Image (tube, coloured by chain):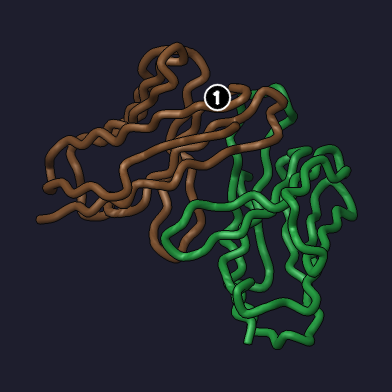
Chain colours: A brown, B green
Amino acid sequence: GQNIDQPTEMTATEGAIVQINCTYQTSGFNGLFWYQQHAGEAPTFLSYNVLDGLEEKGRFSSFLSRSKGYSYLLLKELQMKDSASYLCAVRDNYGQNFVFGPGTRLSVLP
Amino acid sequence: DTEVTQTPKHLVMGMTNKKSLKCEQHMGHRAMYWYKQKAKKPPELMFVYSYEKLSINESVPSRFSPECPNSSLLNLHLHALQPEDSALYLCASSGTSGSPETQYFGPGTRLLVL
């Protein structure tokens, strides 16, 4: 079966650092992806991991541990515009199916 | 060009209408997807086309009918929809299977069924 879990909501302060966790149990694995989605808009790609370790892209970093079925997205120097939903998605072995987690709604407060 | 386009942006239809959603990409991607997304929920996979052939159909009701006329185009034909089908319909494309490439999403069509 496919199961991906994320916290439903998080709140953080402008300028702070926040870590959004994602745990997964899927029948196959060919990469874990993080997307940002503002209300009423399409998801936009942030980061992906296919090997264990940390990937850094500016203010955003993503970490993966395949043995633990665990990933996190780290957002630094939070800005008000970072208020959005953050979706964790796993791509299956055949590469055709992306299974999405429930998403984490992040609110950044002044 | 990493753009996926979708038309129309908004659609209002009655339960007896027939309409079509269109999606286009020119990134050479050979996998194209239709998702349905309700408010405050993640995207829910409906269909996957790989090399212009339907490869995944997630038990979607027959009132939704996908079509892939060529490698750049993807349609979703709608007929006799129900009010609960009102949602944001997202199209996406990705690189060939086996490659850890991401999906690129279109802006979506916001559908309201009356």
Left/right placement of residue A47 relative to residue B65 reads left
**Residue at the image position 60 percent from the left and 40 percent from the top:** B103
The answer to whether A19 is drawn above or below residue A79 in the figure is above
The answer to whether A96 is drawn above or below residue B106 in the figure is above
Please give the chain letter of the residue carrying mark 1. A
**Residue at the image position 60 percent from the left and 79 percent from the top:** B112
In front here: B93 or B67? B67
Tag 1 secondary structure: loop
User: Residue tagged by mark 1?
Assistant: A31
Left/right placement of residue B63 relative to residue B104 reads right
Left/right placement of residue B102 relative to residue B15 reads left
Q: Which quadrant would residue B89 be assigned to in this image?
A: bottom right
Is disc 1 surrounded by few (<14), some (14 to 19) or many (20+) residues within 10 Å?
Answer: many
Left/right placement of residue B50 relative to residue A17 reads right
Measured from the top left, where is residue B46 in percent x and y? 69, 53
The answer to whether A85 is drawn above or below residue B80 in the figure is above
Mark 1: which amino acid?
Answer: Gly
Measured from the top left, where is residue B71 in percent x and y? 84, 46
**Residue at the image position 59 percent from the left and 22 percent from the top:** A29
Furthest-front residue in this view: A1
The quadrant of the image that shows the C terminus of chain A is bottom left
Q: Which quadrant would residue B101 be assigned to in this image?
A: top right
